[in-house]
Image (cartoon, helix red, strand yellow):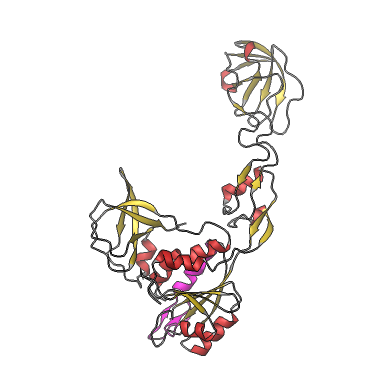
């Protein structure tokens, strides 16, 4: 196949992804899950007019003056009676404003003498939290397709929801290949390296809401690679390494032997040109990522993350933001280049600095990066200060 642009390759991949089914989970277990149905409020919040401060509730028409203390209204235990002219009720933050009151004086502005209280002029409605001021009964608070974070979970709880309908999380099997890798803490041979990409990729994917499983790594044997792919119990199989066309790159050949239909053969992207995508006859999808960690991570951001989101019915396209170049850049080549970079703020906005070394094997550079700076294929030289697009990388 001809080299596809990043956008075209991603579109072809996403066209093959079907949103997964729905399951209901307790709200406390919903963090990171994607809503399958809207969440609406079952009642107003707050359900009554409440006080925003500790103080005293009264009629504004009785102020300034000295009032008779009648009782108190506390959170969860309101004042049951009606406040008459010349009376005042002690009130606490979050408590219901008693019937007959239209004003609150904060406690530091009032002077108590036994059962009498002297107050200054009160302003009607000041320090009030009106009933339904946050949201109304029946109001849609969270839309299907959003991912539950702690703040959205809190909103769903305030809406009266103890459980929510969410999309099933995709099962993704990760298969690393190659004679050159060993899994820490095993001792590497004289020509081997540690598998640094797969554990990081699995951690990234779990953060994107998938159920990730690591398949036992395979050596450069076609029959072993075929069997590993055949046996993987997953919606999506992600291979790391062996995606190119060298004598020891066997993943494509294994996929072909299993009857895979290739939707993306290779991509005009740097790093990550060998990335491919295929569908297996049984409906499983196969994403082949390069073995070099930087290539693998870049393509995971560009392709695996959108695929994981699409399975869950969430927004699937990367969100770019604008920044200004801190340094000049030469003209770009024929492939879209996603450069590891750092972002800093100055008085005029965000300033991005790409690392000088962009070799796809440099994990130390990726560990320090906060964004990926994209250079379009064939882009001319860019001067310092020119506006560019960056993709933020999630950092804990």
Image quarter where the N terminus lies is: bottom left
Residue 277 location, x and y as percent?
A: 48, 74
Instruction: Look at the image and say whether residue 199 sits in the magenta stretch.
Output: yes
Residue 185 location, x and y as percent?
A: 48, 77
Residue positioned 68% across, 60% down in the render: 23
Report the residue that reaches farthest toward the right: 81
Query: Residue 259 occupies which quadrant of the picture?
Result: bottom right
Report the residue that reaches farthest toward the front: 2
- Tell me, yes or no, if residue 204 can be seen here: no
Relative height, residue 265 to residue 356 (above, below): below
Instruction: Look at the image and say whether residue 135 sits in the magenta stretch.
Output: no
Relative height, residue 35 to residue 234 (above, below): above
Query: Residue 5 occupies which quadrant of the picture?
Result: bottom left
| Nearest to the observer: residue 288 or residue 53 | 288
| Nearest to the observer: residue 46 or residue 182 | 46
Residue positioned 40% across, 55% down in the render: 320
Query: Residue 237 occupies which quadrant of the picture?
Result: bottom right
- Tell me, yes or no, if residue 4 can be seen here: yes
| Nearest to the observer: residue 266 or residue 211 | 266
- Over which residues does the magenta segment extend? 178-207
């Amino acid at each position: 196949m001809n080299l596809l642009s990043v956008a075209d390759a991603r579109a072809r991949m996403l066209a093959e992804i079907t949103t997964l089914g729905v399951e209901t989970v307790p709200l406390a277990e919903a963090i990171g899950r994607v809503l399958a149905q809207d969440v609406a409020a079952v009642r107003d919040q707050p359900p009554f007019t409440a006080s925003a401060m500790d103080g005293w509730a009264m009629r504004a028409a009785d102020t300034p003056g000295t009032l008779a203390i009648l009782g108190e209204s506390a959170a969860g235990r309101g004042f049951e009676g009606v406040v008459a002219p010349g009376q005042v009720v002690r009130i606490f933050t979050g408590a219901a404003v008693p019937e007959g009151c239209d004003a609150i004086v904060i406690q530091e502005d009032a002077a108590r003498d036994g059962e009498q209280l002297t107050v200054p002029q009160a302003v009607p409605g000041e320090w009030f939290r009106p009933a339904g001021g946050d949201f109304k009964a029946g109001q849609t608070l969270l839309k299907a397709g959003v991912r539950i974070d702690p703040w959205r979970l809190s909103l769903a709880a305030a809406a009266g929801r103890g459980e929510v309908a969410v999309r099933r999380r995709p099962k993704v099997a990760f298969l690393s290949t190659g004679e050159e890798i060993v899994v820490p803490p095993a001792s590497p041979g004289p020509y081997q390296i540690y598998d640094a990409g797969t554990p990081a990729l699995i951690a990234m994917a779990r953060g994107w809401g998938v159920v990730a499983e690591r398949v036992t790594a395979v050596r450069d044997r076609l029959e072993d690679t075929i069997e590993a792919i055949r046996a993987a119990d997953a919606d999506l199989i992600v291979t790391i390494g062996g995606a190119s066309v060298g004598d020891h790159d066997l993943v494509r050949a294994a996929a072909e032997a299993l009857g895979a239909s290739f939707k993306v053969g290779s991509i005009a992207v740097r790093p990550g040109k060998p990335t491919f995508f295929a569908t297996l006859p049984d409906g499983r999808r196969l994403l082949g990522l390069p073995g070099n960690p930087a290539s693998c991570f870049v393509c995971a951001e560009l392709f695996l993350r959108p695929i994981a989101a699409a399975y869950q019915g969430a927004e699937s396209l990367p969100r770019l933001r604008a920044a200004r170049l801190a340094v000049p850049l030469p003209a770009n080549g024929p492939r879209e280049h996603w450069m590891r970079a750092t972002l800093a703020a100055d008085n005029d906005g965000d300033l991005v600095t790409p690392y000088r070394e962009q070799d796809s094997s440099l994990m130390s550079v990726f560990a320090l990066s906060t964004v990926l700076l994209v250079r379009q294929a064939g882009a001319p030289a860019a001067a310092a200060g020119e506006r560019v697009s960056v993709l933020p990388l999630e950092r804990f």
